[in-house]
Image (tube, helix red, strand yellow):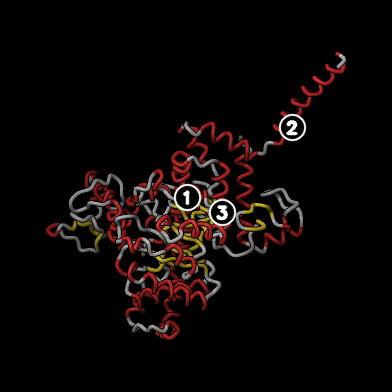
Amino acid sequence: MRPINLFKTILAIFCGVLWAGFASGQAETPAERTAKYLEAVRGQPLQLMGFLERLPKGGDLHHHLTGAVYAESYINYAVEDGDCIDRVTYKILAPPCDAARGMVPASQAIGDFVFRNLVIDALSIRNFHPTAEDRDVRLHFFATFGKFDLVTNKHWGEMLAEVTHRAGAQNEVYLETMLTPDQGEAIQLGRQTAWNDDFAVMRSQLLAGGMAKVVADGRRNLDEGEAKMRQVLGCGGAQADVGCGVTLRYLNQVLRAFPKEQVFAQMVAGFEIASADARVVGINLVQSMDEFNALNDFDLQMRMLDYLHGVYPKVHITLHAGELTPGEVKPEELFASHIRKSIEIGHAERIGHGLDVIYEKDAPGLVAEMAQKHILVEDCLYSHELVRDMKGRENVLPTYLRGGVPVSLATDDEAIVRSELTWYFRRAVEGYDVDYLTLKRMVRDSLEHSFLPGASLWVAPENFTVGEACAGEKLGGEVSGASCRDFLAGSEKARLQWKEEGEFAKFEANF
Protein backbone atom coordinates (compact mmCIF):
# COMPACT_ATOMS: atom_id res chain seq x y z
CA MET A 1 0.00 0.00 0.00
CA ARG A 2 1.32 3.45 -0.90
CA PRO A 3 2.27 5.64 2.10
CA ILE A 4 -0.38 8.23 1.25
CA ASN A 5 -3.12 5.61 1.12
CA LEU A 6 -1.89 4.06 4.35
CA PHE A 7 -2.02 7.48 5.99
CA LYS A 8 -5.59 8.03 4.74
CA THR A 9 -6.62 4.63 6.03
CA ILE A 10 -5.12 5.25 9.47
CA LEU A 11 -6.67 8.73 9.56
CA ALA A 12 -10.07 7.33 8.62
CA ILE A 13 -9.88 4.68 11.33
CA PHE A 14 -8.77 7.25 13.89
CA CYS A 15 -11.56 9.65 12.98
CA GLY A 16 -14.04 6.79 13.03
CA VAL A 17 -13.00 5.83 16.54
CA LEU A 18 -13.27 9.44 17.67
CA TRP A 19 -16.69 9.81 16.10
CA ALA A 20 -17.89 6.53 17.58
CA GLY A 21 -16.83 7.67 21.04
CA PHE A 22 -18.44 11.06 20.51
CA ALA A 23 -21.61 9.53 19.16
CA SER A 24 -21.72 7.07 22.04
CA GLY A 25 -21.40 9.91 24.52
CA GLN A 26 -24.12 11.86 22.75
CA ALA A 27 -26.40 8.81 22.71
CA GLU A 28 -26.11 8.24 26.45
CA THR A 29 -29.51 8.85 27.97
CA PRO A 30 -30.17 10.77 31.20
CA ALA A 31 -31.18 7.47 32.80
CA GLU A 32 -27.86 5.88 31.81
CA ARG A 33 -25.91 8.83 33.23
CA THR A 34 -27.91 8.57 36.44
CA ALA A 35 -27.22 4.84 36.58
CA LYS A 36 -23.48 5.51 36.30
CA TYR A 37 -23.67 8.03 39.13
CA LEU A 38 -25.36 5.51 41.42
CA GLU A 39 -22.62 2.97 40.73
CA ALA A 40 -20.01 5.60 41.52
CA VAL A 41 -21.53 6.44 44.92
CA ARG A 42 -22.81 2.97 45.84
CA GLY A 43 -20.15 2.62 48.57
CA GLN A 44 -20.39 6.23 49.79
CA PRO A 45 -23.21 6.54 52.36
CA LEU A 46 -23.32 10.35 52.34
CA GLN A 47 -23.70 10.67 48.58
CA LEU A 48 -25.89 7.57 48.33
CA MET A 49 -28.43 8.84 50.85
CA GLY A 50 -28.54 12.21 49.11
CA PHE A 51 -29.26 10.43 45.84
CA LEU A 52 -31.96 8.18 47.28
CA GLU A 53 -33.66 10.96 49.22
CA ARG A 54 -34.19 12.90 45.99
CA LEU A 55 -35.19 9.84 43.95
CA PRO A 56 -38.85 9.84 42.82
CA LYS A 57 -40.38 6.86 44.63
CA GLY A 58 -43.80 6.40 43.05
CA GLY A 59 -46.27 4.77 45.39
CA ASP A 60 -46.27 2.75 48.60
CA LEU A 61 -48.74 -0.07 47.95
CA HIS A 62 -48.36 -2.06 51.18
CA HIS A 63 -48.92 0.33 54.07
CA HIS A 64 -50.81 -0.25 57.31
CA LEU A 65 -52.05 3.07 58.69
CA THR A 66 -51.88 2.12 62.36
CA GLY A 67 -48.42 0.57 61.93
CA ALA A 68 -47.14 3.62 60.07
CA VAL A 69 -47.76 6.16 62.85
CA TYR A 70 -44.85 6.57 65.25
CA ALA A 71 -45.16 5.69 68.94
CA GLU A 72 -44.44 9.28 69.94
CA SER A 73 -47.65 10.33 68.18
CA TYR A 74 -49.67 7.67 69.97
CA ILE A 75 -48.34 8.94 73.29
CA ASN A 76 -49.46 12.45 72.36
CA TYR A 77 -52.95 11.19 71.44
CA ALA A 78 -53.20 9.34 74.76
CA VAL A 79 -52.24 12.49 76.65
CA GLU A 80 -54.78 14.55 74.69
CA ASP A 81 -57.52 12.00 75.42
CA GLY A 82 -56.66 11.76 79.12
CA ASP A 83 -55.78 8.07 78.86
CA CYS A 84 -53.57 5.91 81.03
CA ILE A 85 -50.59 3.62 80.41
CA ASP A 86 -50.00 0.30 82.14
CA ARG A 87 -46.59 0.40 83.83
CA VAL A 88 -45.94 -3.29 83.13
CA THR A 89 -47.28 -3.87 79.61
CA TYR A 90 -47.13 -0.21 78.50
CA LYS A 91 -50.55 -0.61 76.91
CA ILE A 92 -52.64 2.54 76.51
CA LEU A 93 -55.81 2.16 78.62
CA ALA A 94 -58.98 4.17 79.15
CA PRO A 95 -59.30 6.28 82.31
CA PRO A 96 -59.66 6.51 85.22
CA CYS A 97 -56.01 5.95 86.01
CA ASP A 98 -55.06 4.18 89.21
CA ALA A 99 -51.42 4.15 90.29
CA ALA A 100 -52.17 1.38 92.80
CA ARG A 101 -53.12 -0.88 89.87
CA GLY A 102 -50.16 0.28 87.79
CA MET A 103 -52.22 2.56 85.54
CA VAL A 104 -50.45 5.91 85.38
CA PRO A 105 -51.52 9.00 83.41
CA ALA A 106 -50.19 8.96 79.86
CA SER A 107 -48.71 12.39 80.53
CA GLN A 108 -46.01 10.62 82.54
CA ALA A 109 -44.58 9.47 79.20
CA ILE A 110 -43.94 13.13 78.35
CA GLY A 111 -41.81 14.26 81.29
CA ASP A 112 -40.41 10.98 82.63
CA PHE A 113 -37.56 10.25 80.20
CA VAL A 114 -36.97 6.64 81.29
CA PHE A 115 -40.66 5.75 81.24
CA ARG A 116 -41.14 7.49 77.89
CA ASN A 117 -38.44 5.37 76.27
CA LEU A 118 -39.84 2.17 77.72
CA VAL A 119 -43.23 3.03 76.21
CA ILE A 120 -41.73 3.81 72.79
CA ASP A 121 -39.81 0.53 72.86
CA ALA A 122 -43.01 -1.35 73.73
CA LEU A 123 -44.97 0.29 70.89
CA SER A 124 -42.28 -0.51 68.31
CA ILE A 125 -39.35 -2.87 67.79
CA ARG A 126 -36.83 -0.21 68.80
CA ASN A 127 -34.16 -1.57 71.15
CA PHE A 128 -35.75 -5.01 71.12
CA HIS A 129 -33.87 -7.55 73.23
CA PRO A 130 -35.31 -11.01 73.87
CA THR A 131 -36.47 -11.79 77.41
CA ALA A 132 -38.29 -14.76 78.90
CA GLU A 133 -41.59 -12.86 78.62
CA ASP A 134 -40.88 -11.18 75.27
CA ARG A 135 -38.63 -13.58 73.43
CA ASP A 136 -39.31 -13.03 69.73
CA VAL A 137 -39.16 -9.83 67.66
CA ARG A 138 -41.95 -11.03 65.38
CA LEU A 139 -44.31 -11.64 68.29
CA HIS A 140 -43.27 -8.32 69.83
CA PHE A 141 -44.04 -6.66 66.49
CA PHE A 142 -47.59 -8.02 66.28
CA ALA A 143 -48.25 -7.32 69.98
CA THR A 144 -47.68 -3.59 69.50
CA PHE A 145 -50.99 -3.12 67.67
CA GLY A 146 -53.04 -4.05 70.71
CA LYS A 147 -51.08 -1.66 72.89
CA PHE A 148 -52.00 1.51 70.98
CA ASP A 149 -55.35 0.33 69.58
CA LEU A 150 -57.41 2.47 71.98
CA VAL A 151 -56.37 5.78 70.45
CA THR A 152 -56.29 4.98 66.73
CA ASN A 153 -59.91 5.38 65.67
CA LYS A 154 -60.19 8.76 67.42
CA HIS A 155 -57.26 10.29 65.54
CA TRP A 156 -57.48 9.26 61.89
CA GLY A 157 -57.04 12.84 60.69
CA GLU A 158 -53.78 13.37 62.52
CA MET A 159 -52.58 9.91 61.53
CA LEU A 160 -53.33 10.47 57.84
CA ALA A 161 -51.57 13.83 58.05
CA GLU A 162 -48.46 12.19 59.51
CA VAL A 163 -48.18 9.46 56.89
CA THR A 164 -48.96 11.67 53.88
CA HIS A 165 -46.45 14.27 55.07
CA ARG A 166 -43.77 11.59 55.37
CA ALA A 167 -44.66 10.23 51.95
CA GLY A 168 -44.53 13.64 50.29
CA ALA A 169 -41.25 14.51 51.99
CA GLN A 170 -39.70 11.40 50.43
CA ASN A 171 -40.94 12.19 46.91
CA GLU A 172 -43.76 9.66 46.90
CA VAL A 173 -46.75 10.65 44.79
CA TYR A 174 -49.19 7.89 45.76
CA LEU A 175 -50.17 6.01 48.90
CA GLU A 176 -52.56 3.08 49.37
CA THR A 177 -53.04 2.62 53.09
CA MET A 178 -54.88 -0.21 54.82
CA LEU A 179 -57.53 0.59 57.42
CA THR A 180 -61.01 -0.45 58.55
CA PRO A 181 -63.39 2.25 57.28
CA ASP A 182 -66.32 1.04 59.43
CA GLN A 183 -64.09 0.85 62.51
CA GLY A 184 -65.36 -2.60 63.50
CA GLU A 185 -69.08 -2.40 62.70
CA ALA A 186 -68.90 -5.23 60.14
CA ILE A 187 -67.36 -7.50 62.78
CA GLN A 188 -70.27 -6.78 65.09
CA LEU A 189 -72.73 -7.46 62.26
CA GLY A 190 -70.98 -10.76 61.61
CA ARG A 191 -71.35 -11.74 65.28
CA GLN A 192 -75.09 -11.23 64.97
CA THR A 193 -75.41 -13.28 61.78
CA ALA A 194 -75.49 -17.05 61.90
CA TRP A 195 -72.98 -18.80 59.65
CA ASN A 196 -74.30 -20.35 56.45
CA ASP A 197 -72.17 -22.44 54.11
CA ASP A 198 -74.11 -20.95 51.19
CA PHE A 199 -72.20 -17.71 50.61
CA ALA A 200 -75.07 -16.17 48.62
CA VAL A 201 -77.49 -16.73 51.49
CA MET A 202 -74.94 -15.43 53.99
CA ARG A 203 -74.40 -12.29 51.95
CA SER A 204 -78.15 -11.69 51.65
CA GLN A 205 -78.51 -11.97 55.42
CA LEU A 206 -75.75 -9.42 55.95
CA LEU A 207 -77.20 -7.00 53.41
CA ALA A 208 -80.61 -7.26 55.05
CA GLY A 209 -79.16 -7.06 58.55
CA GLY A 210 -77.65 -3.59 58.33
CA MET A 211 -74.76 -3.60 55.86
CA ALA A 212 -75.94 -0.32 54.31
CA LYS A 213 -75.36 1.43 57.65
CA VAL A 214 -71.89 -0.15 57.94
CA VAL A 215 -70.97 1.26 54.52
CA ALA A 216 -72.48 4.69 55.22
CA ASP A 217 -70.66 4.96 58.55
CA GLY A 218 -67.40 3.89 56.93
CA ARG A 219 -67.71 6.60 54.29
CA ARG A 220 -68.49 9.17 56.96
CA ASN A 221 -65.42 8.10 58.95
CA LEU A 222 -63.26 8.65 55.84
CA ASP A 223 -64.86 12.05 55.24
CA GLU A 224 -64.12 13.16 58.79
CA GLY A 225 -60.59 11.77 58.76
CA GLU A 226 -59.72 13.47 55.48
CA ALA A 227 -61.21 16.78 56.58
CA LYS A 228 -59.06 16.75 59.72
CA MET A 229 -56.02 15.67 57.69
CA ARG A 230 -56.42 18.63 55.33
CA GLN A 231 -56.81 20.96 58.27
CA VAL A 232 -53.64 19.68 59.94
CA LEU A 233 -51.66 19.89 56.68
CA GLY A 234 -53.07 23.27 55.69
CA CYS A 235 -54.17 21.96 52.30
CA GLY A 236 -55.52 24.73 50.08
CA GLY A 237 -53.66 27.41 52.01
CA ALA A 238 -50.60 29.45 51.17
CA GLN A 239 -48.33 27.22 53.28
CA ALA A 240 -49.75 23.82 52.32
CA ASP A 241 -47.71 20.87 53.55
CA VAL A 242 -45.95 18.63 51.05
CA GLY A 243 -48.32 15.85 52.07
CA CYS A 244 -51.19 17.66 50.35
CA GLY A 245 -49.67 16.68 47.01
CA VAL A 246 -49.82 12.94 47.72
CA THR A 247 -52.67 11.03 46.09
CA LEU A 248 -54.23 9.01 48.92
CA ARG A 249 -56.40 5.91 48.53
CA TYR A 250 -57.54 3.17 50.89
CA LEU A 251 -57.60 -0.63 51.05
CA ASN A 252 -60.37 -2.05 53.22
CA GLN A 253 -58.57 -4.44 55.54
CA VAL A 254 -60.18 -7.69 56.72
CA LEU A 255 -59.01 -9.21 60.01
CA ARG A 256 -58.50 -12.81 58.89
CA ALA A 257 -57.84 -14.31 62.33
CA PHE A 258 -61.45 -13.71 63.42
CA PRO A 259 -64.23 -16.34 63.27
CA LYS A 260 -65.41 -17.17 59.77
CA GLU A 261 -68.77 -15.37 59.96
CA GLN A 262 -66.99 -12.18 61.03
CA VAL A 263 -64.37 -12.54 58.31
CA PHE A 264 -67.06 -12.96 55.67
CA ALA A 265 -68.97 -9.95 57.01
CA GLN A 266 -65.83 -7.83 56.79
CA MET A 267 -65.24 -9.02 53.23
CA VAL A 268 -68.77 -8.10 52.18
CA ALA A 269 -68.37 -4.70 53.82
CA GLY A 270 -65.10 -4.17 51.97
CA PHE A 271 -66.54 -5.10 48.59
CA GLU A 272 -69.62 -2.97 49.23
CA ILE A 273 -67.77 0.17 50.26
CA ALA A 274 -65.25 -0.21 47.43
CA SER A 275 -68.21 -0.39 45.04
CA ALA A 276 -69.74 2.76 46.52
CA ASP A 277 -66.72 4.97 47.25
CA ALA A 278 -63.90 5.58 44.75
CA ARG A 279 -61.47 6.35 47.58
CA VAL A 280 -61.56 2.68 48.64
CA VAL A 281 -59.76 0.97 45.79
CA GLY A 282 -59.61 -2.63 46.99
CA ILE A 283 -59.44 -5.07 49.89
CA ASN A 284 -56.72 -7.01 51.69
CA LEU A 285 -56.65 -9.63 54.45
CA VAL A 286 -54.43 -8.76 57.42
CA GLN A 287 -53.12 -10.23 60.71
CA SER A 288 -50.36 -12.78 61.26
CA MET A 289 -50.59 -15.75 58.91
CA ASP A 290 -49.84 -18.28 61.65
CA GLU A 291 -52.79 -17.30 63.86
CA PHE A 292 -55.15 -20.26 64.15
CA ASN A 293 -58.12 -19.01 62.13
CA ALA A 294 -55.93 -17.38 59.48
CA LEU A 295 -54.15 -20.69 58.90
CA ASN A 296 -56.98 -23.14 59.56
CA ASP A 297 -59.56 -21.22 57.49
CA PHE A 298 -57.22 -20.17 54.70
CA ASP A 299 -58.82 -22.31 51.98
CA LEU A 300 -62.28 -21.27 53.14
CA GLN A 301 -61.29 -17.61 53.00
CA MET A 302 -59.98 -18.05 49.45
CA ARG A 303 -63.33 -19.57 48.47
CA MET A 304 -65.08 -16.60 50.06
CA LEU A 305 -63.00 -14.27 47.90
CA ASP A 306 -63.65 -16.39 44.83
CA TYR A 307 -67.40 -16.06 45.35
CA LEU A 308 -67.33 -12.34 46.16
CA HIS A 309 -65.07 -11.61 43.20
CA GLY A 310 -67.81 -13.06 41.02
CA VAL A 311 -70.36 -10.73 42.62
CA TYR A 312 -68.10 -7.66 42.58
CA PRO A 313 -65.72 -8.24 39.63
CA LYS A 314 -64.58 -4.61 39.46
CA VAL A 315 -63.26 -4.50 43.03
CA HIS A 316 -59.49 -5.01 43.25
CA ILE A 317 -57.90 -7.61 45.53
CA THR A 318 -54.39 -7.65 46.96
CA LEU A 319 -53.45 -10.23 49.57
CA HIS A 320 -50.85 -10.87 52.21
CA ALA A 321 -49.51 -14.19 50.95
CA GLY A 322 -46.63 -16.48 51.77
CA GLU A 323 -45.78 -14.91 55.14
CA LEU A 324 -44.52 -18.11 56.74
CA THR A 325 -40.93 -19.12 57.40
CA PRO A 326 -39.33 -22.52 58.21
CA GLY A 327 -39.95 -23.65 61.78
CA GLU A 328 -42.76 -21.16 62.32
CA VAL A 329 -45.44 -23.72 61.41
CA LYS A 330 -45.58 -27.42 60.53
CA PRO A 331 -43.95 -28.32 57.19
CA GLU A 332 -47.33 -29.31 55.77
CA GLU A 333 -48.60 -25.79 56.42
CA LEU A 334 -45.49 -24.19 54.98
CA PHE A 335 -45.90 -26.21 51.78
CA ALA A 336 -49.64 -25.49 51.44
CA SER A 337 -49.27 -23.23 48.36
CA HIS A 338 -50.68 -20.09 49.97
CA ILE A 339 -49.26 -17.81 47.27
CA ARG A 340 -50.60 -19.90 44.39
CA LYS A 341 -54.04 -20.21 46.01
CA SER A 342 -54.13 -16.47 46.74
CA ILE A 343 -53.62 -15.81 43.04
CA GLU A 344 -55.58 -18.64 41.44
CA ILE A 345 -58.51 -18.89 43.88
CA GLY A 346 -58.42 -15.58 45.79
CA HIS A 347 -57.94 -13.51 42.60
CA ALA A 348 -55.06 -11.50 44.06
CA GLU A 349 -53.72 -9.02 41.51
CA ARG A 350 -50.81 -8.29 43.83
CA ILE A 351 -49.36 -10.10 46.82
CA GLY A 352 -47.65 -8.74 49.89
CA HIS A 353 -44.43 -10.28 51.22
CA GLY A 354 -44.32 -13.63 49.37
CA LEU A 355 -41.62 -14.87 51.72
CA ASP A 356 -42.13 -18.62 51.40
CA VAL A 357 -42.21 -18.83 47.61
CA ILE A 358 -39.37 -21.35 47.50
CA TYR A 359 -41.51 -23.78 49.52
CA GLU A 360 -44.45 -23.63 47.09
CA LYS A 361 -45.23 -26.69 44.97
CA ASP A 362 -43.48 -26.17 41.62
CA ALA A 363 -41.95 -22.90 42.80
CA PRO A 364 -40.25 -22.17 39.44
CA GLY A 365 -43.58 -22.66 37.70
CA LEU A 366 -45.31 -20.33 40.15
CA VAL A 367 -42.72 -17.58 39.66
CA ALA A 368 -43.09 -17.96 35.88
CA GLU A 369 -46.88 -17.74 36.25
CA MET A 370 -46.58 -14.58 38.35
CA ALA A 371 -44.36 -13.01 35.71
CA GLN A 372 -46.70 -14.05 32.90
CA LYS A 373 -49.80 -12.76 34.75
CA HIS A 374 -47.99 -9.61 35.94
CA ILE A 375 -48.70 -10.33 39.62
CA LEU A 376 -46.75 -7.68 41.50
CA VAL A 377 -44.98 -8.42 44.78
CA GLU A 378 -45.20 -5.70 47.43
CA ASP A 379 -41.73 -6.25 48.89
CA CYS A 380 -41.25 -4.89 52.40
CA LEU A 381 -37.50 -5.48 52.22
CA TYR A 382 -36.27 -3.64 55.31
CA SER A 383 -39.07 -5.01 57.48
CA HIS A 384 -38.34 -8.55 56.26
CA GLU A 385 -34.77 -8.21 57.44
CA LEU A 386 -35.59 -6.79 60.89
CA VAL A 387 -38.74 -8.71 61.77
CA ARG A 388 -38.15 -11.98 59.87
CA ASP A 389 -34.33 -12.04 59.81
CA MET A 390 -34.45 -12.64 56.05
CA LYS A 391 -31.06 -11.38 54.99
CA GLY A 392 -28.75 -12.30 52.15
CA ARG A 393 -29.74 -15.47 50.33
CA GLU A 394 -32.79 -15.90 52.56
CA ASN A 395 -34.33 -12.71 51.17
CA VAL A 396 -36.72 -13.26 48.26
CA LEU A 397 -36.17 -9.97 46.40
CA PRO A 398 -33.48 -11.39 44.05
CA THR A 399 -35.67 -14.46 43.37
CA TYR A 400 -38.55 -12.36 42.10
CA LEU A 401 -36.35 -9.97 40.13
CA ARG A 402 -34.51 -12.83 38.41
CA GLY A 403 -37.86 -14.43 37.58
CA GLY A 404 -39.16 -11.32 35.85
CA VAL A 405 -41.88 -10.78 38.47
CA PRO A 406 -42.83 -7.10 38.92
CA VAL A 407 -41.80 -5.77 42.33
CA SER A 408 -42.38 -2.55 44.21
CA LEU A 409 -40.73 -1.61 47.49
CA ALA A 410 -43.19 -0.94 50.32
CA THR A 411 -42.93 -0.06 54.00
CA ASP A 412 -45.54 -2.35 55.62
CA ASP A 413 -45.43 -0.83 59.15
CA GLU A 414 -42.75 1.82 58.89
CA ALA A 415 -43.27 3.27 62.38
CA ILE A 416 -43.22 0.01 64.29
CA VAL A 417 -40.04 -0.87 62.39
CA ARG A 418 -38.76 2.72 62.95
CA SER A 419 -38.09 3.36 59.28
CA GLU A 420 -39.18 5.17 56.13
CA LEU A 421 -39.37 4.18 52.47
CA THR A 422 -36.01 5.73 51.54
CA TRP A 423 -34.29 3.23 53.82
CA TYR A 424 -35.90 0.35 51.91
CA PHE A 425 -34.37 1.71 48.71
CA ARG A 426 -31.01 1.97 50.45
CA ARG A 427 -31.17 -1.66 51.56
CA ALA A 428 -31.99 -2.71 48.00
CA VAL A 429 -28.89 -0.91 46.73
CA GLU A 430 -26.45 -1.80 49.50
CA GLY A 431 -27.71 -5.25 50.42
CA TYR A 432 -28.76 -6.69 47.06
CA ASP A 433 -26.81 -4.69 44.46
CA VAL A 434 -29.97 -3.33 42.83
CA ASP A 435 -29.03 -0.84 40.11
CA TYR A 436 -30.71 2.41 39.10
CA LEU A 437 -32.63 1.07 36.12
CA THR A 438 -34.11 -1.64 38.35
CA LEU A 439 -35.04 0.92 41.00
CA LYS A 440 -36.71 3.01 38.31
CA ARG A 441 -38.60 -0.02 37.04
CA MET A 442 -39.84 -0.79 40.55
CA VAL A 443 -41.01 2.80 40.99
CA ARG A 444 -42.84 2.69 37.66
CA ASP A 445 -44.36 -0.66 38.60
CA SER A 446 -45.68 0.78 41.87
CA LEU A 447 -47.88 3.13 39.84
CA GLU A 448 -48.57 0.65 37.02
CA HIS A 449 -49.97 -1.83 39.56
CA SER A 450 -51.74 0.72 41.73
CA PHE A 451 -55.50 0.35 41.92
CA LEU A 452 -56.12 3.83 40.55
CA PRO A 453 -58.78 3.88 37.82
CA GLY A 454 -58.07 4.39 34.15
CA ALA A 455 -55.83 3.09 31.41
CA SER A 456 -52.08 2.92 31.86
CA LEU A 457 -49.69 5.35 30.21
CA TRP A 458 -47.71 2.34 28.94
CA VAL A 459 -48.57 0.00 26.07
CA ALA A 460 -48.42 -3.07 28.37
CA PRO A 461 -47.40 -4.00 31.93
CA GLU A 462 -43.63 -3.99 32.38
CA ASN A 463 -43.24 -2.56 28.87
CA PHE A 464 -42.50 1.08 29.52
CA THR A 465 -43.21 2.30 26.02
CA VAL A 466 -45.68 5.17 25.83
CA GLY A 467 -49.04 4.31 24.34
CA GLU A 468 -50.18 5.70 21.02
CA ALA A 469 -52.15 8.66 22.42
CA CYS A 470 -49.05 10.31 23.93
CA ALA A 471 -46.31 8.75 21.79
CA GLY A 472 -45.29 12.02 20.14
CA GLU A 473 -45.03 14.00 23.37
CA LYS A 474 -42.04 14.72 25.58
CA LEU A 475 -42.52 12.20 28.37
CA GLY A 476 -43.70 13.95 31.52
CA GLY A 477 -43.53 17.38 29.89
CA GLU A 478 -46.11 19.94 28.81
CA VAL A 479 -48.71 18.22 26.63
CA SER A 480 -49.35 19.81 23.23
CA GLY A 481 -51.50 17.27 21.38
CA ALA A 482 -55.25 16.89 21.82
CA SER A 483 -55.12 13.09 21.81
CA CYS A 484 -52.70 12.99 24.75
CA ARG A 485 -54.60 15.68 26.65
CA ASP A 486 -57.84 13.76 26.23
CA PHE A 487 -56.21 10.48 27.21
CA LEU A 488 -54.68 11.90 30.40
CA ALA A 489 -57.92 13.67 31.27
CA GLY A 490 -59.71 10.32 31.14
CA SER A 491 -57.27 8.30 33.25
CA GLU A 492 -56.26 9.12 36.81
CA LYS A 493 -53.60 6.41 36.69
CA ALA A 494 -52.03 7.77 33.50
CA ARG A 495 -52.04 11.33 34.87
CA LEU A 496 -50.08 10.24 37.93
CA GLN A 497 -47.69 8.20 35.79
CA TRP A 498 -47.15 11.23 33.54
CA LYS A 499 -46.47 13.39 36.58
CA GLU A 500 -43.92 10.88 37.85
CA GLU A 501 -42.13 10.80 34.51
CA GLY A 502 -41.78 14.56 34.79
CA GLU A 503 -40.23 14.08 38.22
CA PHE A 504 -37.81 11.51 36.81
CA ALA A 505 -36.82 13.94 34.05
CA LYS A 506 -36.02 16.65 36.61
CA PHE A 507 -34.16 14.18 38.82
CA GLU A 508 -32.04 12.69 36.03
CA ALA A 509 -31.15 16.14 34.70
CA ASN A 510 -28.87 16.49 37.74
CA PHE A 511 -26.44 13.80 36.51
Structural distance between the alpha carbons of marks 3 and 2: 32 Å
Which of 10/88 is in front?
A: 10
Structural distance between the alpha carbons of marks 1 and 3: 17 Å
**Decide: marks 3, 2 in contact (CB < 8 A)?**
no
> Could you tell whether 376 is left or right of 148 in the image?
right
Dot 3: element = helix
Q: Residues within 10 Å of mark 1 (few under 14, many from 20)?
A: some
Residue at left offset 72%, top offset 55%:
470
* Residue furthest front as drawn: 1
Q: Amino acid at mark 1?
A: Thr
Q: Residues within 10 Å of mark 3 (few under 14, many from 20)?
A: many
Q: Residues within 10 Å of mark 2 (few under 14, many from 20)?
A: few
| Image disc number at residue 399 | 1
The residue that mark 2 highlights is 23
**Decide: marks 1, 2 in contact (CB < 8 A)?**
no
The residue that mark 3 highlights is 445
* Residue furthest left as drawn: 100
- Quadrant where the N terminus sits is top right
From the image, state whether disc 1 or disc 2 is nearer to you: 1
- Earlier-in-chain disc, 1 versus 3: 1
> Could you tell whether 58 is left or right of 105 in the image?
right
Which of 415/94 is in front?
A: 415
Q: Is residue 403 visible?
A: yes
Percent x, y of residue 84: 23, 58
Structural distance between the alpha carbons of marks 1 and 2: 37 Å
Residue at left offset 43%, top offset 75%:
304
Dot 2: element = helix
Q: Is the residue 131 above or below the residue 261 in the image?
A: above
Dot 1: element = helix
